[in-house]
Image (cartoon, rainbow, N blue to C red):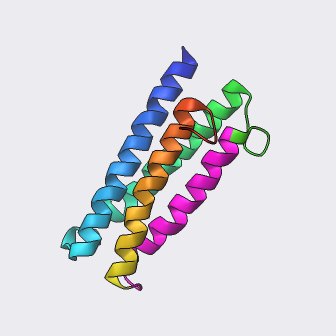
Amino acid sequence: MVFRLIQTLHIVFVLSSYVLFLMRGIWSMIGASIMQTRWIKIAPHFIDTLLLVSAIALAVIIHQYPFADAWLTAKVTGLLLYIGLGFVALRGRMSKTIRFMAWFAVQGIFAYIVMVAVTHNPFPG
């Protein structure tokens, strides 16, 4: 019961974080003023904190951990790539071409992370 609740919350946080990243990337590329609003600057940190807490809780509940279980190691590695490229995509210091390529690459990384999560296999296919 607790596992399913945390799992459901985790999925909600994953989707919320991803959709917000997707939209922020688009808004950033077109120079939308919404990127300067307070809630757009705060919400991702709040959602991502809840996402991380739910991920840790799930790992503890199922007794599987990064660097001990290959699929979770793959998820964490994918997450680090996601964060790094997401940072490039949303920062105005790079050219629009570089930012777009990073934003586009993040879409594939997100798909990989989801496939690993669903299959518990670092090489889903």
Question: Is residue 83 in the magenta section?
Answer: yes
Query: As displayed, is residue 42 above or below residue 95?
Result: above
Residue 37 visible in the shown view: no
Residue 30 visible in the shown view: yes
Query: As displayed, is residue 94 above or below residue 38?
Result: below
State left or right for residue 121 relative to residue 105: right
Quadrant for the N terminus, please: top right
Quarter where residue 117 is shown: top right
Residue placed at 32% from the left, 81% from the top?
Answer: 96
Q: Nearer the viewer, residue 121 or 19?
A: 121
Quarter where residue 20 is shown: bottom left
Where does the image place residue 90, in percent across and percent down from the top left?
39, 71
Residue placed at 56% from the left, 45% from the top?
Answer: 52
Q: As drawn, which residue projects farthest toward the front?
A: 125
Quarter where residue 116 is shown: top right
Q: As drawn, which residue projects farthest toward the top?
A: 1
- SS assignment for the magenta stretch, majority: helix
**Number of callouts:** 0
Where does the image place residue 95, in percent across and percent down from the top left?
36, 85
State left or right for residue 88 relative to residue 122: left
Query: As displayed, is residue 104 above or below residue 65?
Result: below
Where does the image place residue 92, in percent across and percent down from the top left?
37, 82
Residue placed at 79% from the left, 40% from the top?
Answer: 68
Question: Is residue 73 in the magenta section?
Answer: yes
Where does the image place residue 109, in percent across and percent down from the top left?
49, 54
Q: Nearer the viewer, residue 108 or 90?
A: 108
Question: Bounds of the magenta span?
Answer: 71-94
Residue placed at 41% from the left, 84% from the top?
Answer: 94
